[in-house]
Image (tube, coloured by chain):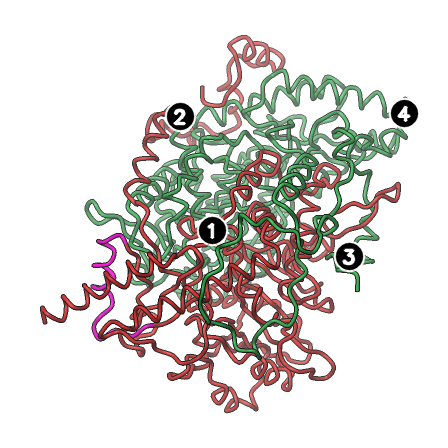
Amino acid sequence: MTELTAREPLIFELSKPGRKAGTQFPPAIAGNAEIPAHLRRAAPPALPAVSELQAVRHYTRLSQMNFSIDTHFYPLGSCTMKYNPKACNTYAMLPEFLGLHPLGPEPQGFMACMYELQDMLREITGMQGVSLTPMAGAQGEFAGVAMIRAYHRARNDLQRTEIIVPQAAHGTNPATAAMCGCSVKEIPCDANGDVDIDALKSAVGPCTAAIMLTNPSTLGVFEHKIAEVARIVHEAGGLLYYDGANLNAILGKVRPGDMGFDVIHMNLHKTFSTPHGGGGPGSGAVGVGARLLPFLPIPIVGRDGSRYRWLTERDLPQSIGRLSGFMGNAGVNLRAYIYMRLLGREGMVRVAEFAALNANYLLKRLQAAGYEAAYPKRRASHEFIITLKRENRETHVTAMDVAKRLLDYGFHAPTTYFPLLVPECLLIEPTETEAKEDLDRFCDAMIMIRREMTEDPEKLASAPHTMPVRRLDDVRAAKQLDLAWKPAA
Amino acid sequence: MAFIPHTGDDIAAMLDVIGVREIGDLFDEIPVELRAGALALPPAMGEMEVGRLLTERAAIDGRPLNFIGAGAYEHHIPAPVWALATRGEFYSAYTPYQAEASQGTLQLIYEYQSMMCALTGMEVSNASLYDGASALAEACLMAVRANRASNSRRILLPRAVNPTYGQVARTIAGNQDVIFDTVDFDRASGRTLLESLESRGGEDITALVVQQPNFFGCLEEVDELTDWAHRRKILLIAVVNPVSLALLTPPGQWGGAVDGTRGADIVCGEGQPLGVPLSAGGPYFGFMATRMQYVRQMPGRIVGRTVDTEGRPGFSLTLQAREQHIRRSKATSNICTNQGLMVTAATIYMSLLGAEGLARVAQSSLQRTADLVAALSRIAGVKAAFSAPRFHEAVLLLDRPVAPVLAALARRGILGGLDLADLYPELGNALLVCATETKLGADIDAYAGALAEIMNAARAAA
């Protein structure tokens, strides 16, 4: 971070009436077509008037105020911030793909890619069918729970509206259940991070629609007793939902379908390395077992002989329906396809292996430096949790302080305060694409920070010191809402 | 090894620190009976081979001359838009939860929110939703929460609103018992029928959806529709095309003042026309804006401007108490992401065009569509379906089924529009066409020439 990037004016502050990027204007054309007066806008919208160079410089400078995978190690637990290969972007942005109108004739070249992507995802997850339509993990979750509801409804099993989630579940799980008109029952985890089997047995019953699980769980450990969990839920008449947030940990090692799951959503922006883009677009493909096949969201790519075609409500009359205007985040799916072709079967297994190697190595080194693992008896999956409750008791340093101080050392912060049930926690996921040297530099920073906890705690409490801004006043942000620039009256 | 940086020495040293013999030992907590066999996937490819494969696939689809709109519009995208949006610092950044390390993305979203407020005439905008169709679904759920004057879950959804949006709204909001009632359109003008609304005066309704321009490209009498809703304490949800707003009255100013307020209550739509390529239907982005009084009912991320501990201005995500990671089952929506990268592109697009450039794009699209309709209507057996003024789309009626005509045009490299036979069978042989500023006079002539030949040949063969 240089001084140059310390403060960049708003684009509106660069604006001057009469200035323009004229090259970008379409030619003026003759004609008398016009909007009737009573529907016409009275005054032009207050958009900036800048030159092309001003816009380019402004947004380049803004970009330089971001951390990103391309510039920084980003050990953000549960988010799988691995390298986004440039090839995926370059070839997804071939002009023919970018120019495809979604309502044109069925594009055979593009659909061939999507058909093969469906196939590869089905193979990796051990499911029977895949739909690429959901536009993000949360929409994939919605599709999954909506399919579960449709399944029970189709069997006239109408009272099954309870979704069981472990305490450590992602916030989206209960939010999704509510969006699908279901209620949520939380069950505890035991001291080793596994689902409490007794609690599960007493939670299931004639109202159970499903259980939603992440495996490895959000606690960063593999759910040992998954086969037993599956048996208990299925015997009670419920289904198993797999939250694919942590799929990176198990690629090629164990398949959700083989574990007994009936439905899964995948976050293609995590496991299959499509870009996070500063908060989207994601893509949340869903896979299902035989029971839920008729309910998949449409459209899906099908094949008649050598011709690909869209499967719609005509082919799947029991489908939960459409989730997007067309067929989801097609360009994101194309990036995932390219990534999977680059990796192939050999590369896919290595993802899980090296994600686990990096996570377990980092955990051991941090433990050796004096940090406390939340689940010390367990093997890390692709991520692990450090708890700072002891440090917090002794020095008042918080997980947030450590996270902010890491920014000064040139590392993006790990996920903090999630999962909610581990106090003062850091959820750390290095991913497979980081080199040993980068993990070691991160450990060095954590060792330095550990020293600062006793020698200079104020430095931690007031971190970060080298970013474009210091800690922000979130209370003021929420109370004195300033959500849009307004032109001077 | 694809994207794995580890050398043999690295692996040995790391295994040594961990205290296991081989990498496979790290998976010893997975029960043996569950472990996967070899995956049946194709072998790895190098970048050169993948590039070749994708280039061949892309060539199959070609680059036809496109006159389809229907919710996805082909506009010129200035070169800086994606050159900047694909910079790694935007492209490979996460959601800006760590505000100090994300000021670039946060300031950009604040600028985006400001631009969307300016375009729509509303007080607050969120940081975007998935796409236009799902944004309408979220708007309907929001209206049910926001309309305190009504306990109804009934929403009026005119048939002149994009039918796919209706399907998506039913998929998403239907599980929460929201009921959608249709409102018919006038066969002559193509506008939503105010009379068919009047007949429903006594019912309990929470919101009315109005699309401007509507799915047929016709301009609705938005002032009358807005006032009708507000006089009955029904919220008005506007679905708008952002490019059209450079010329059209912004939804925030629709209607007269009823009880001291005017304008739509929730505005949403498809952001794709603002610098996002057609790209087979996505990724696009949905936008949403509303009145300040409803901000806490709005789903999706919102960025606010605040100050840091030294009093310097800065930006952060705000009002997070509405969201799933805090509120869990009580959240306004389960949505986590916005479509950040698409918003990045749209913000740069709007900066480059400004109000004047965007108005030129809109005016040019309006004129090209008028020219297209005039040229096609001169062909025997082709006429415009509706009398209402339009923006950049129009429904044409043919004297024969549309599908074979479109297929014949496609063979000549022209995508002639969308066949409405499935969506609106009552219209007969109806074809929805669109021309934006990207269609030059020669393109329109090429379409008209081809269509005339195809229609004449079909007539001669009959």
Q: Earlier in the sequence, mark 2 or mark 1?
A: 2
Question: Which residue matches tag 3?
Answer: A482
Q: Amino acid at mark 2?
A: Glu
Q: Amino acid at mark 4?
A: Asp
Q: Residue farthest to the top?
A: B9
Kindly indicate whether the residue at mark 4 contacts the one at mark 1 (C-beta within 8 angstroms).
no
Q: Earlier in the sequence, mark 3 or mark 4?
A: 4
The magenta-colored residue range is B396-413
Asked if both marks, 2 and 1, belong to the same chain, the answer given is: yes
Q: At which x and y percent is residue B199?
A: 50, 91
- Nearer mark to the viewer, of 2 and 4: 2
- Nearer mark to the viewer, of 2 and 1: 1
Q: Nearer the viewer, residue A298 or B302?
A: B302
Secondary structure state at the residue bearing disc 1:
loop
Q: Residue farthest to the left?
A: B461
Kindly indicate whether the residue at mark 1 contacts the one at mark 2 (C-beta within 8 angstroms).
no
Chain in red (letter): B
Is B97 inside the magenta-drawn segment?
Answer: no
Residue found 57% across the figure and 28% down from its top = A431
Secondary structure state at the residue bearing disc 3:
loop
**Measured Cα–Cα span from mark 2 to mark 1:** 30 Å
Quarter holding the C terminus of chain B is bottom left
Q: Chain of mark 3?
A: A
Question: Which residue matches tag 1?
Answer: B76
Q: At which x and y percent is residue A183?
A: 59, 61
Can you see residue A314?
yes
Disc sitting over residue A456 in the figure: 4
**Measured Cα–Cα span from mark 1 to mark 4:** 55 Å
Chain in green (letter): A
Residue A423, quarter of the rendered image: top right
- Nearer mark to the viewer, of 3 and 1: 1
